[in-house]
Image: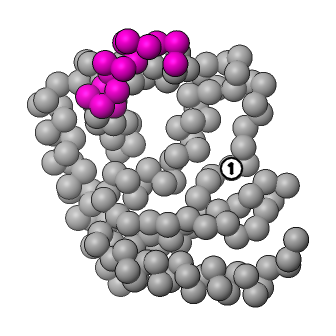
């Protein structure tokens, strides 16, 4: 699913940013610019097929989570990557960039509403909690996020 969804984002990125990237290629990381420009190979037919597929996935996700008000999990799947390797290894950069959005992307692709908030740290790095709700449940989600924040502010040690 995420591979197919990535292609859809490639098509969207080229529509939004393609001209600017071609005009000013020095203003974007070459690996990212190349990924954005890959959208030129994505057809309208493929975009529609993908959109229909995402609609089916959205419907199935909402069916499977219909007994719950929220789905809660980490914002990031791992601690931040090694910066020096990001700067020198394009494949590693792309892999880490995709990994860093892998959990939040679910909400984006399925049209859910979501929030993330700091909940502490691990190995010296901040840890985020992501709370997702069905589409158009922003008021309920923000009330929940506020309650979680209030609870965490009283439960976590002060710095």
Determine whether 77 is above or below 146 in the image: above
Q: Is residue 27 left or right of residue 7?
A: right
Location of the N terminus (image quadrant): top left
Q: Is residue 38 left or right of residue 118?
A: left
Residue 150 visible, this angle: yes
Magenta span contains residue 93? no
User: Would you say the magenta stretch is mainly helix, strand or loop?
Assistant: helix
The segment highlighted magenta reads: 13-27
Residue 64 visible, this angle: no
The image quarter in which residue 29 lies: top right
Q: Count the labels in the image.
A: 1
Determine whether 38 is above or below 115 in the image: above
Q: Is residue 98 left or right of residue 105?
A: right
Magenta span contains residue 20? yes
Q: Position of residue 83 (x, y in %)?
A: 75, 31
Determine whether 86 is above or below 67 in the image: above
Number of other residues with Cα within 10 Å of mark 1, as a class: few under 14, some 14 to 19, many 20 or more? few
Q: Position of residue 7 (x, y in %)?
A: 32, 32
Q: Residue at 46% across / 12% down in the picture?
A: 25
Q: Residue at 53% across / 38% down in the picture?
A: 98
């Amino acid at each position: 699913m995420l591979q197919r969804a990535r292609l859809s984002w490639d098509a969207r990125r080229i529509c939004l940013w393609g001209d600017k990237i071609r005009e000013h290629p020095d203003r974007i990381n070459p690996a990212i610019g190349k990924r954005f420009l890959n959208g030129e190979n994505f057809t309208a037919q493929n975009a529609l097929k993908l959109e229909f597929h995402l609609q089916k996935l959205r419907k199935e996700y909402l069916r499977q989570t219909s007994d719950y008000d929220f789905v809660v999990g980490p914002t990031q799947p791992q601690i931040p990557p090694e910066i020096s390797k990001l700067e020198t290894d394009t494949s590693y950069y792309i892999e880490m960039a995709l990994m860093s959005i892998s959990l939040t992307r679910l909400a984006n692709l399925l049209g859910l509403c979501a929030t993330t908030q700091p909940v502490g740290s691990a190995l010296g790095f901040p840890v985020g909690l992501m709370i997702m709700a069905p589409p158009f449940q922003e008021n309920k989600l923000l009330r929940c996020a506020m309650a979680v924040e209030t609870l965490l502010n009283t439960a976590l040690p002060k710095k």
